[in-house]
Amino acid sequence: MKKLKLSLLIVLSSVSFSFAQSLLQSGPLVGYSTMREVCLWVQTTKEAKVKFSYWNVNDKAKKFFTNEVATKADEGFTAKIICGNLDEGQTYNYELFINNKKVVRPYELKFQTQKLWQWRSDPPNFSLVFGSCNYVNEPKYDRPGKPYGANHEIFKSILEKKPDLMIWLGDNFYYREGDWDSWSGILHRNTHTRSLPELQPLWGSVHHYAIWDDHDFGPNDSDRGFWNKERTFEAFKLFWPNPSFGINGKPGITTYFQWSDVEFFLLDDRYYKTPNDRSDEEKVILGENQFNWLIDNLSYSHAPFKVVAVGGQFLNSNTGTENFSRAPKERERILKALEANKIEGVIFIDGDIHRSEISKLVRENSYPIYDFTISPFTAGPSKISDNPFRIENTVYADRNFARFEITGARKNRVLKCTLFDVNGKEIWNYPINENELKYKK
């Protein structure tokens, strides 16, 4: 009888474990990090209760638990949960529970808090990966013909570089015609892309931040006139655990974060963008509110590198693509504001055009402005077109990703950008010393 009860208990435990595993749709995903808290994200297949346990890798005996959150159908069965009261500069492992049953993943789940280095030491070295344009095929809704997405093994190559964080520069997935006109379609596309098997290990141990561009905002080349933008905005907030969304009480994906001594300004190039075919008003991409927020915060910053992330190219003046050449006066206004306020260390990163390149604007009596365009991850590469600001031998028209490594002592920091192909093989690298990005005395 005891053997029968034990066997029954083992069977029931196995069934319960398998059921918990089946309730996981995608994730867990590691979101923003501060010195004292980290945000984790997860998605279930149906309504369920989720929570995390976590522990310092140097003190495995002391476990902490987050609050429990119920996932809901109208929120895509997603949950964002805060791991709070953490110690600065530490690494933690964590595990997921669904309906109080532990869900085991076949890879390491970890996150880190940022180090309190100010007034104590040189800023920590770190690395980040970035890029854009991730297309996951779904034949039922894709255009007929050759599949547009490929080489999803690129995400394994990214993980192997062991970055501290990753920035998604828009077109992180692609709404199809069957998606953007309904909440069901919007949730489906987010879920389908987020659930790609090759992405799961990357979600679990690298901190992720994101902006959008047209394809994860709405239809191709969409702008402020897109009638369903409030819904795609709601989906963005559900699926990306960024530190914040929008500024000055207005909707949008604009946000900010700092990692070590580098500051990042993530911009929204769609929610307030003037339609391309409007000719009765001056065209903008950021709009007045976002422009002032950007210049205010860049003026306040003392970071050696101030990284401005936006969906489309900032410097390229070729009007054949969607970039800031569509709003030339706004671009010029930004450049003049940088100079008028003596704002140093500004670098732009962006995507969209399905090729990678570095653009450089040389300014008289000032430092050069660099624009790193990195695209695509898995979407179809494009043909090379003109860019008068392109640095020679930096254009690459195949699937790829880039890494920034920030190293060196305070006041002598170096940012090195390296471009890699889908297998993680180096294509080129380009270093910039912080002193190159200062105004001439």
Image: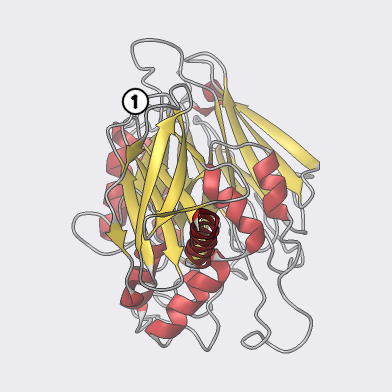
Badge 1 density bin: few <14, some 14–19, many ≥20, Cα 10 Å: some
Q: Can residue 386 be seen by looking at this rendering?
A: yes
Q: How is the image coloured?
A: secondary structure
The furthest residue to the front: 1
| Residue occupied by mark 1 | 87
The answer to whether one can see residue 314 in this image is no
Q: Residue pushed farthest top? A: 120
Q: Viewed as shown, does residue 286 lie left or right of 2?
A: left
Q: Position of residue 333 (x, y in %)?
A: 38, 51
Residue drawn at point x = 43 percent, y = 58 percent: 42
Secondary structure under tag 1 reads loop
Residue 88 falls left or right of residue 185: left
Picture layout, residue 91 above or below residue 290: above
What amino acid type is highlighted by mark number 1? Asp
Q: Nearer the viewer, residue 51 or 133?
A: 51
Q: Say which residue appears at 35% left-offset and 44% top-offset.
A: 256
Q: Residue 108: give x, y in percent of width and height.
A: 58, 41
Q: Position of residue 250 (x, y in %)?
A: 22, 62
Query: Which quadrant is home to the C terminus?
Result: top left
In the image, what residue occupies the spot 55% across and 28% down?
A: 126
In the displayed structure image, the side of residue 16 where residue 145 appears, left or right: right
> Which x, y percent locates residue 343?
38, 33
Q: Is residue 17 above or below residue 75?
A: above
